[in-house]
Image: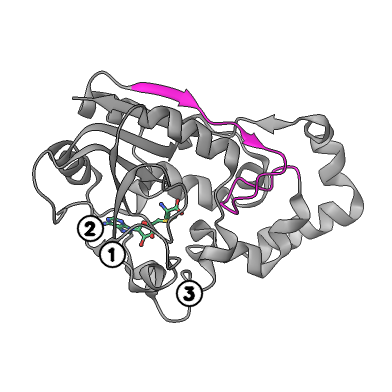
Amino acid sequence: MSEAVYDKKGAALSEGYALRRRPDPRMASLIAGALGDARSVLNVGAGTGSYEPTDRLVQAVEPSEGMIAQRPADAAPCLRGSAEALPLEDGAYDAAMAILTMHHWSDWRAGLKEMRRVARRIVLLTFDAEGSDFWLTRDYFPQILADDRKIMPRLSELKSELGDLHVTPVPVPHDCVDGFLGAYWRRPQTYLDPDARKSMSPFARIDTEAGLKRLADDLDSGAWRTRNVDLLTREELDIGYRLLWWDR
Ligand SMILES: C[S@@+](CC[C@H](N)C(=O)[O-])C[C@H]1O[C@@H](n2cnc3c(N)ncnc32)[C@H](O)[C@@H]1O
């Protein structure tokens, strides 16, 4: 998958993206912690600018015109480019971050090599599809999980690529304000909303009709509630998101 998915006519995933993908402050604080004392930060696959620090010198890189056009006027400067060929000099940044983007790259190993070339620290927010047991993909959209298991780099692969890697779970708050796929684990009704699904690229890859009908039926009949009652009192849930950082 590539930036084309975000610009493709019809899918129009980038349309309205900035409105739905707003940084969640709790996740932002974990990312800020992982950036450590970095003063200059490169944001790769930056999209509309979620999680870009405002108290450091930031440069963004993003291939999709639709995304770049939605970056707020006061966002960091953004170059059009891809992770696999960063248009930047060696060692130019203290840290390079890549948030929920690596699975879109045509060659994630090449992208990581480029990040290591331009920065001394790498911070990645990614999804461990191997270890995930999320009701949405397990019970309603198994194709998303199967696809994710093919396209998401495995933690073991990332470890063997990067060597010494710090990995920390990123639990999703029950009232997460960032509209990515796992955000609504305690608000299942939201997945029935086509607008909410627009910022979730996995839905653009599959036929959603049967899964949506099953979910709507289970919400109506109470079957979803019965099966997931233990989630309703949870404040946060680990569904597989992982924050990784690596130092040269
Ligand atoms: C799920 S969005 C995440 C955007 C942003 N990091 C965020 O968290 O809101 C994935 C982004 O990766 C970008 N992307 C796709 N292929 C890429 C590549 N080869 N190199 C860098 N970014 C890429 C897409 O255009 C899109 O903006």
Q: How is the image coloured?
A: one colour
Magenta stretch bounds: 166-186
Q: Is the C-beta of the residue carrying label 1 under 8 Å from the nearest atom of ligand 1? A: yes
Say which residue label 3 marks: 11
Amino acid identity at mark 1: Pro
At a point 32% along the width and 25% down the height, the residue shown is 156
Q: How many angstroms separate mark 3 from mark 1 (CA)?
A: 17 Å
Callout 2 amino acid? Ser
Give me the C-alpha separation between circle 1 and circle 2. 6 Å
Question: How far from the left and from the top, in percent, is residue 148?
Answer: 44, 46
Left or right: 115, with 133 as reference point: left
Query: Is residue 152 shown above or below 6?
Result: above
Q: Is residue 45 above or below residue 120?
A: below
Q: Which of these two is toward me, 120 or 106?
A: 120
Residue density around tag 2, few if under 14, some if 14–19, many if 20 or more, within 10 Å? many
Q: Nearer the viewer, residue 89 or 106?
A: 89
Nearest to N terminus: mark 1 or mark 2: 1
Residue 207 in view here = no
| Residues at marks 1 and 2 touching, judged by CB atoms closer than 8 Å | yes
Label 1, secondary structure: give it: loop
Residue beneath disc 2: 82
The image quarter containing residue 121 is top left
Where is residue 212 shown, x and y percent of the image? 70, 61
Magenta stretch, main secondary structure class: loop
What x and y, as percent, mark residue 214?
A: 75, 57
Q: Mark 3 or mark 1: name the one nearer the start of the chain.
A: 3
